[in-house]
Image: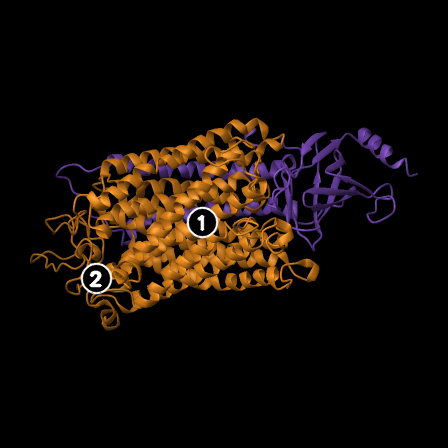
Chain colours: A purple, B orange
């Protein structure tokens, strides 16, 4: 069942998958209990000549206890799912960890404009570098994304990182991740953004520290 | 009590126009809503065919149509959603069943405001006409998604759609006006025109469901009407309510839209559950289990539905601290619905169940809606939503709620009340063929979509083969398309059965299912004015299999004195 998801390469991806499977186990049990009851009652209590139905109205406490008890279990499981969900949500969306690298991604119809801060580590200075649809990051470093949009709402989706964040014009939204495995991963847009929405795509290139250094040198040595 | 209605109801010999077109009779109006809803279902079904062909065989000619350009694909997904929610589900579940059943079930001669009722269906017809026209204006129909998120929807240059989207907004506004008028009518009628003895807790559950739906709609639609006017102003008058360059806020629309949009889900869900709740006791020959808990659960779910809307916006850029409260309310709303589902299952327990087509569709509604409900918990969990938001997991989830609700329950209701609506019986064998094919191909099509969703396939993309990570799963897209086309073809038996039975079906008696509620005491079909004499109600609507009665049913309006010494069970 592991192949239900694309390979996870972020530090928090496993937490999200785990909540998914946690909910999956609970709902699958309920699915089989309820569908099983419907099916078995439908077969067991099918109409037979000369046999009348049991006259039960479910209007006293003793009978209602059957469904109320089940309802209470549902409530407790709901709260359990909420509590575990809140922990993971807090880990990802709560206090943002301090980042090793900041990258600005600006969405526009139908591209990701990606701005790197350069050697000074600051965005908005002379040594910034802009690339289209290519996000280069080193493995094992915390990357902070500063997400903006120039026109309509887009959504930055990195399936392998289990990261998705809408880019809203007029806002600067921060997101973060730490990639755990070098490789090339796709980075599509997940929010309908116009006629070019299908095919609006980019690449996340997670490099080993050495490869990342090499890439950085190639791109900034020309200026220095 | 019925004076207002009776004055309206007793026209002398209405002519053709007044009988079929400009009728104030709630039953004719129900049929008009039904016809419009079924017409739109065919249009909506055709959009499905085009969408699915494009997804399975991108950039190839759709047989019988031609190539689909990316911007037209966006039109298709937009109009598919709009049509199915607002122009199929609403007119069939509320317009048709609500209008037909409420007066009959409470023992009234007509709605409280028959002329307002006629106005509401004609406003809906006008909305339908405008939506249809929007396909043919220069620039084409709306293509910003059925949710119409600005800024995409707020400026012509972003989509290239000009009047198509304006007309789309206008059609919505008129549709809302129409259902507001219906809602006022439903509530006023149920409050004032109940037959003697019909207390609130003797109302059939579908009436409770329709009334709760009417209240939810009336309370939630206001903000969206305001929001839609602001969007229209942004488009035609140069305002910037949603455009950040002029100080506007795109997220404002999302809050207004979903403040309405989520209660709207229950506006269509509740009447559908009502249909299932009416059919189950009749074909189980048992009282519904837990009438009161069902009523209270319905009201509780209705109230909760107003505080869950932001679960559509976990990753929209709103404050992440807002997510958990909405996540909690969303997941907790499963409790009242779980109680209703358990009550339905308990109704089957110990029953004497016969599998008419109506009962099969009712059980099918329950069996498939369960999947919709359970998968909602995944979406409702904020951290899981980060990943599955805007993927086919969500697409499959909401089809597992809306298809059971609109089609399974809608068909259940049509097969069940057809004899009352048209005075003739439908052909059961063909109905069962229709059910099994629909049930099998629906699940065959939508179960694999959950998997595409967990693999990350995004909504509203016209061509999955443009993405390396989705290419390996293209065979699944082809499988889904084949299943969906078979699902569409499975509706042919219904169309044949429906039209044939209307003219040639066996003439129906008053009460072919031996059911208890008041509509079955009227003639089939009921004449103008419904009842020969105003019925008197003696008990609650689900007295099946009462031990002290010889038959296994006891209609609400039949007097019954238990033999001396036997205590009548409380009602």
Which disc number belongs to residue A173? none
- The reply to whether residue B193 is in sight is yes
The chain identifier of the residue carrying mark 1 reads B
Neighbours of disc 1 within 10 Å: few (<14), some (14-19), many (20+): many
Left or right: B409 with respect to B516? right
Label 1 sits on a secondary structure element that is helix
In x, y percent, where is residue B549?
11, 51
Q: Residue at point 31% right, 68% down?
A: B113
Q: Nearer the viewer, residue B410 or B59?
A: B59
Asked if B430 appears above or below B402 in the picture, the reply is above
Q: Nearer the viewer, residue B195 or A161?
A: B195
Q: Quadrant of residue B539?
A: bottom left
In x, y percent, where is residue A223?
91, 39
Q: Quadrant of residue A145?
A: top right
Q: Quadrant of residue B522?
A: bottom left
**Residue matched to label 1:** B83
Q: Residue at point 27% right, 43% down?
A: B498
Left or right: A218 with respect to A40? right
Asked if B421 appears above or below A12 in the picture, the reply is below
**Residue matched to label 2:** B528
* Count of numbered tags: 2
């Amino acid at each position: 069942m592991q192949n239900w998801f694309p390979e996870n390469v972020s530090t928090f991806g496993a937490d999200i998958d785990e909540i998914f499977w946690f909910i999956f186990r609970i709902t699958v049990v309920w699915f089989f209990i309820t569908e099983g009851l419907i099916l078995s009652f439908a077969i067991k209590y099918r109409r037979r000549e000369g046999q009348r139905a049991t006259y039960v109205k479910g209007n006293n406490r003793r009978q209602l206890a059957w469904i109320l008890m089940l309802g209470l279990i549902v409530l407790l499981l709901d709260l359990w799912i909420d509590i575990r969900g809140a922990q993971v949500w807090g880990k990802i969306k709560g206090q943002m960890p301090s980042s090793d690298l900041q990258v600005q991604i600006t969405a526009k119809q139908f591209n990701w404009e990606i701005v790197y801060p350069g050697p000074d580590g600051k965005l908005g200075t002379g040594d910034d570098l802009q690339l289209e649809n290519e996000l280069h990051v080193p493995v094992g470093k915390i990357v902070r994304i500063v997400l903006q949009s120039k026109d309509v709402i887009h959504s930055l989706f990195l399936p392998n990182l289990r990261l998705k964040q809408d880019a809203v014009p007029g806002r600067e939204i921060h997101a973060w991740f730490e990639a755990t495995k070098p490789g090339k991963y796709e980075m599509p847009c997940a929010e309908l953004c116009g006629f070019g929405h299908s095919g609006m795509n980019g690449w996340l290139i997670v490099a080993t520290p050495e490869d990342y250094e090499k890439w950085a040198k190639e791109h900034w040595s020309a200026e220095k | 009590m019925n004076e207002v209605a009776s004055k309206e109801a007793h026209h002398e010999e209405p002519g053709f126009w007044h009988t079929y077109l400009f009728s104030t009779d709630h039953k004719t109006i129900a049929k008009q809503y039904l016809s419009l809803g079924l017409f739109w279902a065919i249009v909506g079904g055709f959009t499905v065919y085009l969408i699915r062909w494009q997804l399975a065989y991108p950039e190839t000619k759709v047989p019988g149509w031609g190539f689909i350009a990316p911007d037209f694909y966006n039109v298709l997904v937009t109009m598919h959603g709009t049509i199915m929610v607002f122009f199929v589900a609403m007119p069939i579940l509320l317009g048709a069943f609500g209008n037909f059943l409420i007066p009959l079930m409470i023992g009234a001669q007509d709605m409280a405001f028959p002329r307002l009722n006629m106005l509401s269906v004609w406003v809906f017809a006008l909305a339908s006409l405008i939506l249809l026209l929007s396909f043919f204006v220069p620039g084409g129909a709306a293509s910003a998604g059925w949710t119409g998120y600005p800024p995409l929807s707020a400026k012509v240059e972003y989509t290239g759609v000009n009047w198509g989207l304006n007309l789309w907004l206008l059609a919505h506004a008129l549709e809302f006006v129409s259902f507001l008028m219906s809602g006022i009518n439903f509530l006023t009628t149920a409050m004032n025109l109940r037959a003697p003895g019909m207390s609130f807790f003797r109302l059939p559950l579908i009436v409770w469901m329709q009334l709760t739906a009417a209240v939810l709609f009336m309370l939630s639609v206001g903000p969206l009407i305001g929001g839609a006017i602001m969007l229209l102003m942004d488009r035609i008058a140069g305002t910037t309510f949603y455009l950040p360059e002029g100080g506007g806020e795109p997220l404002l629309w999302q809050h207004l839209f979903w403040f309405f949009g989520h209660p709207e889900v229950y506006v269509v869900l509740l009447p559908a559950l009502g249909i299932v709740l009416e059919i189950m006791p009749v074909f189980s020959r048992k009282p519904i289990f837990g009438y009161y808990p069902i009523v209270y659960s319905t009201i509780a779910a209705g109230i909760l539905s107003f505080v869950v809307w932001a679960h559509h916006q976990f990753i929209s850029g709103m404050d992440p601290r807002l997510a958990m409260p909405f996540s909690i309310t969303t997941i907790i709303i499963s409790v009242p619905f779980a109680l209703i589902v358990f009550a339905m299952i308990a109704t089957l327990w110990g029953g004497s169940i016969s599998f008419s087509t109506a009962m099969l569709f009712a059980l099918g509604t329950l069996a498939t809606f369960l999947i919709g409900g359970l998968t909602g918990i995944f979406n409702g969990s904020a951290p899981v939503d980060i990943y599955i938001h805007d993927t086919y997991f969500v697409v499959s989830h909401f089809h597992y709620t809306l298809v059971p609700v609109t089609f399974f329950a809608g068909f259940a209701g049509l097969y069940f009340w057809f004899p009352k609506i048209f005075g003739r019986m439908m052909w059961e064998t063909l109905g069962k063929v229709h059910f099994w094919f629909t049930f099998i191909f629906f699940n065959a099509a939508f179960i694999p979509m959950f998997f595409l969703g967990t693999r990350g396939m995004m909504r509203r993309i016209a061509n999955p083969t443009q993405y390396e990570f989705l290419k390996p799963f293209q065979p699944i897209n082809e499988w889904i398309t084949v299943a969906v086309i078979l699902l569409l073809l499975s509706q042919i038996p219904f169309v044949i059965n429906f039209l044939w039975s209307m003219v040639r079906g066996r003439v129906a008696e008053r009460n072919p299912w031996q059911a208890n509620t008041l509509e079955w005491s009227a003639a089939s079909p009921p004449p103008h004015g419904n009842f020969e004499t105003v019925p008197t109600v003696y008990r609650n609507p689900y007295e099946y299999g009462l031990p002290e009665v010889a038959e296994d049913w006891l209609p609400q309006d039949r007097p019954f004195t238990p033999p001396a010494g036997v205590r009548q069970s409380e009602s």
